[in-house]
Image (cartoon, rainbow, N blue to C red):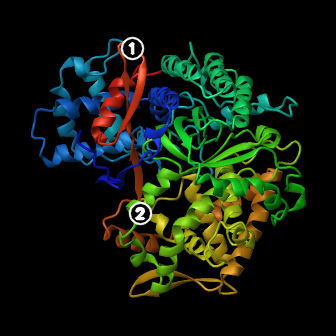
Amino acid sequence: MQTEIFSYNDEQFADLQMLRYKVDGFEQLSISRKKLIYYLSEAALSGRDILWDQNGKYNLLIRKTLESIYTDYTGNRESEEFKAFTVYLKRVWFSNGIHHHYGCEKFKPEFSKTFFLEAFRNLPADKLPLENGQTAEELCKMLVTIIFCPEVMPKRVNQTDGEDLVTTSSCNYYGEGLTQAEAESFYNTMKQENNTHPVMYGMNSRLVKNGEKTVEKVWKSGGLYGAAIDRIVYWLEKAANTAENKKQAEVINKLIEFYRTGDLRTFDEYTILWVQETEALVDFTNGFTETYGDPLGLKASWEGYVNFKDTEATARAEKLSANAQWFEDHSPVDERFKKQTCRGVSAKVIKAAILGGDLYPASAIGINLPNSNWVRAEYGSKSVTIGNLTEAYNKAAHGNGFHQEFVVDEETIQMLEQYQDICDDLHTDLHECLGHGSGKLLPGIDSDALKSYGSTIEEARADLFGLYYLADPKLTELELTPNAEAYKAQYYSYMMNGLLTQMVRIEPGQDIEEAHMRNRALIAHWAYEHGAKEHITELIQRNGKTYIRIHDYEKLRQLFGVLLREIQRIKSEGDYIAARKLVEQYGVKNDLKLHREILMRYQALHLSPYKGFINPVYTPIYDEEGEIIDVKVTYGEKYDAQMLRYSRDYATLPYINE
């Protein structure tokens, strides 16, 4: 049998590079754990259509049409037009829709309208996504308008201050004709009930106008997205019967109950059970989770992933979680906002087995859940660092010339080469394991009080917590950092990214929209400005190129502590005005001249600013009675083949979901 050759790097196109991640240790798992991972993986892939529809009303329609052209086009497939079409389709696949996965702007096709019309009209009728008596010409006209007109659905998520964020966003969380004021009023009325354990209102529904009334269409079995949810439940039921222990089976069954009822109280019960189950090797998330895709930060995108614990690497995260109370007690924030008792902080390093929904193809490398503030306060949270994804990123980045182009001198390059990987992993651990779980809201403060700025403030809070403690002697004492100087590598790379290099992810002239990017810009620009008088950091020019130099790392740490104190106050008090001022002043705008310079330097390296992953393939092996006796994992599937297979095997929803 020929041994499969594994490579982390795969193809590049547009601003994207596809990577592979390896699931080392899977082959050594017991057959029951392999089956559990397989069943949970199928559940994680079965919700794919949900995210596509959440990202835009016409995404499933467009995906089917583009894929039909890609597979059935009979013209010159080596032409520049077809090549441009292929890049467009691959970008749409990557972003689960027609808007950029990070910047949220609509893709501009580099192929002509003439090419599209000819390719479309040559498709057989049975290859077109026609529904409800629609003709091919009607479909064609609609798609041309959506794809080629810049003013139609221009942004998936609009965060521009002063605009109606609902009517100007193209995501599919709110029905036509609904305004931001109406949506906020609807949920504010719900929140007026005096409840110390509030559910996450609106998390699993689309809000629409029904005549003069505003109503929710709940995502559940028998409701909106019901066909996809029923497929997810089918695989979850199999997983429940293969669970590692009784408590894990309870977790899965409670999730099934939530999917069937759509009851948000049941969802809280599920998250509590999930947080408390810490014994099993295999774990997962599956459901409506993060709210970055909603301009109001209420409605959650669908995601799923499956993992198993990296026992050796988890020792690092466990040291942090075991000392959670020490970090909370010694935080520079006001005593009023500290937790007196840190409960249930569990942390581990994991190996991703499959990525799905909003974690595929682009994925977070660290995750802290659940998002309910009262569940976290009373029951704790689970924090994970996804070790095999960070390994893939690191392997792909070494030797690519990035440091030589953007780092100020050889001494700093050597420091980064020696310490950046370990400190970056540690910062992720601190961010996820402790940062998100630190602090508390004052009594009576609405967890959504910061509105559209809430995600940026929360990410800044967790990042600052990690940055502040990365330089603390406690980490050297715990043998988590190799020495007292290693943290400087992360400080330098963070400031360089926030001030300079993350701009490669933004089109010239565009503001920063994405919450994590706003967070990093906010921290870096605030620290740069507030350290100017003491010359703590400096932007220098050399041969027409801009670099950052850090003169005093210890004072930079002190600045991080001051900003952490203020960010925690804003979060704890629900100070919307201060949050808005801070984000708008430091986290939104780019210097146009500097932006152009950074883009030119980066493009000369022929690097891709965004990375995503191709999933491994799990193939069950059956005996004569139809029982699974083994599951094989392989890595050779190409990006386009995987996307086409997923569209074929996990198509669950109508093209338009009303």
Dot 1 lies on which element?
loop
Q: Nearer the viewer, mark 1 or mark 2?
A: 1
Q: Is 346 located above or below residue 208 in the figure? A: below
- In the image, residue 299 lies at what x, y percent? 62, 34
Other-residue count near label 2 (Cα within 10 Å), few / some / many at <14 / 14–19 / ≥20: some
Instruction: Give the residue at x 66% y 73%.
Output: 527
Q: Is residue 66 visible?
A: yes
Q: Classify residue 626 as left or right of residue 235.
A: left
Q: Is 269 located above or below residue 343 in the figure? A: above
Between 242 and 388, the one lying in front of the other is 242
Residue indicated by mark 2: 508
Which numbered marker is on residue 626?
A: 1
Instruction: Give the residue at x 40% y 64%.
Output: 397
- In the image, residue 545 lies at what x, y percent? 41, 82
Instruction: Give the residue at x 21% y 36%.
Output: 116
- In the image, residue 563 lies at what x, y percent? 74, 67
Between 453 and 183, the one lying in front of the other is 453
Type of the residue with mark 2: Pro
Q: Classify residue 178 as left or right of residue 637.
A: right
Q: CA distance from mark 1 to mark 2?
A: 57 Å
Between 379 and 493, the one lying in front of the other is 379
